[in-house]
Image (tube, rainbow, N blue to C red):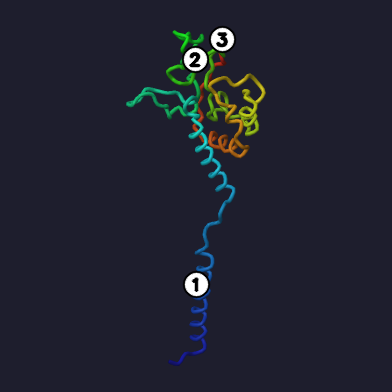
């Protein structure tokens, strides 16, 4: 085979181009997409918050309960939305005997005892009736100080804030990060009622 100058140049040009494209494709085409470390950390924080909300039993009181096929269960369509505003309670319960100290509403979101009546708060990120305008600092202070908004009225039984106050800042921030991912539910929870 005898190639002329132009033909040899064309062949070498094509071979060079093929090799160059192969090298470029190998070096750049097989690279994984850039890792967004902040996004990964946020997803891990939210996952941790969901875990803490689950093992902390937050849905036990802050999610209204309904009667399911196997008995009472949390209504997860209203997850962490607190005591339903349409379920009016106007006075503390009166236990029928001295063996009972406190009582709970059928929704498991209102509790009556020597402290009066307490209502589980709306923890969803609704801006008007929930935690939508809370900062992580307000949330941490609420839990650590046992006071609504961190400085206001006391958190009432059965809220176990004295246990939760021992959580780390990292854990409380994770809970807040998870709460912010929930569906905002407009639900104005009533203020506590004084003892009878």
The residue under the point 47% across, 27% down is 60
> Relative to 46, is 152 on the left or the right?
right
Task: Give the image location of residue 191, x and y in percent.
Answer: 57, 16
Q: Position of residue 175 (x, y in %)?
A: 56, 35
**Residue pictured at 43% horizontal, 29% vertical:** 77
Image quarter (top left, top right, bottom left or bottom right) of the C terminus: top right
For this orientation, the residue located farthest to the right is 151
Question: Quick check: 79 above or below 98?
Answer: below
Q: Which residue is mark 2?
A: 102
Disc number for residue 22: 1
Front residue of 32/43: it is: 43
Q: Nearer the viewer, mark 2 or mark 1?
A: 2
Q: Residues within 10 Å of mark 1 (few under 14, many from 20)?
A: few
The answer to which of marks 3 and 1 sits earlier in the sequence is 1
Residue 135's image quarter? Answer: top right
Q: Are marks 3 and 2 in contact (CB under 8 Å)?
A: no
Measured in 3D between alpha carbons, the distance from the residue under mark 3 to the one under mark 1, in whole angstroms, is: 80 Å
Residue drawn 61% across and 37% down? Answer: 168
The label number, if any, that marks residue 195 in the structure image: 3
Estimate the x, y position of residue 156 in percent, counting from the top left: 57, 19
Q: CA distance from mark 2 to mark 1?
A: 76 Å
Q: For this rendering, which residue is in front, 162 or 73?
A: 162
Sequence order check, earlier mark of 3 and 2: 2
Mark 1 residue element = helix
């Amino acid at each position: 085979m005898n190639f002329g100058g132009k033909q040899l140049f064309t062949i070498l040009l094509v071979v060079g181009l093929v090799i160059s494209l192969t090298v470029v494709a190998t070096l750049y085409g097989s690279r994984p997409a850039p890792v967004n470390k902040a996004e990964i950390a946020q997803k891990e924080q939210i996952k941790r918050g969901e875990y803490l909300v689950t093992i902390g039993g937050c849905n036990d009181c802050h999610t209204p309960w309904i009667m399911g096929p196997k008995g009472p269960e949390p209504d997860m369509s209203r997850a962490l939305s607190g005591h339903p505003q349409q379920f009016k309670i106007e006075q503390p319960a009166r236990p029928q005997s001295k063996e009972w100290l406190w009582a709970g509403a059928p929704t498991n979101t209102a509790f009556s005892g020597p402290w009066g009546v307490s209502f589980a708060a709306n923890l969803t990120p609704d801006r008007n009736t929930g935690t939508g305008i809370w900062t992580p600092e307000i949330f941490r202070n609420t839990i650590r100080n046992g006071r609504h908004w961190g400085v206001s009225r006391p958190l009432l039984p059965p809220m176990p804030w004295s246990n939760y106050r021992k959580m780390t800042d990292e854990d409380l921030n994770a809970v807040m990060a998870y709460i912010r991912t929930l569906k905002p539910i407009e639900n104005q929870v009533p203020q506590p009622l004084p003892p009878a």
